[in-house]
Amino acid sequence: MDIEVEPNRPDFLSIFGVAREAAAATGVKLMPVDTSVEEVPELVADVVSVRIDDLDACPRYVARAVRGVAHRPSPLGVQARLTASGIRPIDAVIDATNYTMLEIGQPLHAFDLRRLAGSGIVVRRASDGERLITLDDVERTLTSNDLLICDTEKPVALAGVMGGQTSEVSAETTDVLLESAYFTRSGVLLTARRLDLHTEASHRFERGTDPEACPGAAARCAALMARWTGGQVMRGVAEAGRAPERRWVALRPARTTALLGYPVSGEAAASVFASLGMRSRPDGDRLEVEIPGFRTDIEREVDLIEEVVRIQGYDHVGSTMPRSRHPGGVPDPYAFARRVKGALAKAGLREVRPVPFDAASDLALFGDTDAIPVTNPLRAEEGFLRTRLTPGLLHAVALNQSRGVDTVRIFEVGTTFRLADPFVEIRKAGFALCGSDGEGWWSEQRALDVLDAKGVLESLLDDLG
């Protein structure tokens, strides 16, 4: 199944996020991800410390530790799922971080705990010109706009984008430090674009991850890592920062009803939000909705209204034709032009539609001096709006004769233009006849003359009454 994920819905970049949406749409109960983990008595906080120097760029950082991991392939079913999702299986340690990311939507990173100087994590801004060799074996030159994950001595990862070689998990790794952090969107986006370095992690951080998911994702990943590698999860977490406070956005059922065009009660709206995992509470004639961390797209009342109609179904919205200012039909000038065209066609003529421009020579031929010049004509020699239909009809006759068509019966109903104050448009009808009468070799050939033209004109006037 392929799902097109819009940039404003990063919660769909995980299996659990899609399942949450499917549960809301179908009414099926959503089963939460199991984040329970068996821990040994040793405390993570006694081994690892975390410090954030820039809380604006990294509001939350959670670290867990797993000791005694053995490097072996992850289970075959896990490898199949990763491959189907476009991620190459590596080993059980790395596969656990990628599997949890796909499952919950929270990017994670594994460090070799023994290769971290001082076993401490410091989140700070890079210095201009500072360098880091990332996991793709490329040395990156950084600026003060880039955020780094460091140990007590050196940078070990480019925050939210890619890890560094100095702390890379290898076959010799036995103890793993697991990072589960929340980085702001703008910082990761600028770094990834400047370095032209786009990863699964940066793809998610750029769109917005759930700051509330950091502890649960770390626990889930640690449990999988211990299960697949035979390691032991240390007790608790080392953490700095916290998730931002949840926002409350108000919804007015009356406004929802007016905007959607069908009645929506406060109870019905509350039921929709409950199915989406959003808590709500009544407040007079409004319904206040608590926005969870995974819904980065909801900011205004209209966003909540969209959620209501999306879950209830767009088929609830009625179809009403817009009112017309006119009672219908064709305006009189256009109706008359249609009648003229019909009468001339019935008289045996064919309609032509030449471009409404004239050359200076055409104007001189008829002595017209009040033509309107065109600033940017289609053809340099046709630099004026036409003052009469005759030149266009004559050019059409000449073009047909040059291509071997001897008998021509054509007409045009169109607009002419003349300078006035500032200009005037006049609707005219014209026709041209040349060649001979008769439809074939068996008919008597007779040259068309003024009497034929008079007959066309009389037929037109008769039809027009």
Image (tube, rainbow, N blue to C red):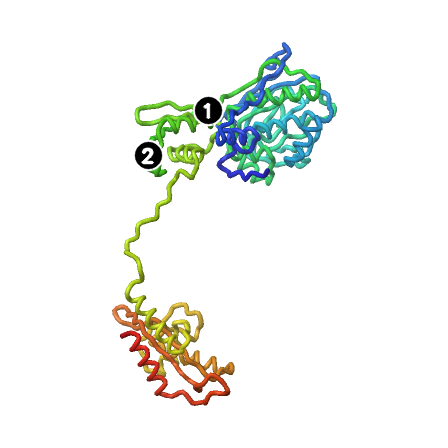
> Secondary structure under badge 1?
loop
> Residue 194 location in percent, x, y?
56, 40
Give, as a three-letter code, the residue at label 2.
Arg
Residue under label 1, please give it: 244
In the displayed structure, 190 sits above or below 377; it is above
Q: Is residue 247 left or right of residue 464?
A: right
What residue is at 29 percent from the left and 67 percent from the top?
333
In the rendering, at what x and y percent does residue 127 appear? 56, 31
Give amino acid for label 1.
Pro
Q: Nearer the viewer, residue 406 or 423?
A: 406
Q: Nearer the viewer, residue 35 or 438?
A: 438
Confirm or deny contact between disc 2 and disc 1 (CB under 8 A). no
Judging by the rendered image, the residue that carries numbered circle 2 is 255
Give percent across and percent down for residue 175: 68, 19
The image position of residue 351, as x and y in percent, is 41, 74
Say the numbered circle drawn on residue 258: none
For the point 74% across and 24% down, the residue is 72
Q: Nearer the viewer, residue 241 or 403?
A: 403
Closer to the eye: label 2 or 1: 2
Q: Quadrant of residue 431?
A: bottom left
Label 2 crowd bin: few (<14), some (14–19), many (20+), radius 10 Å: some
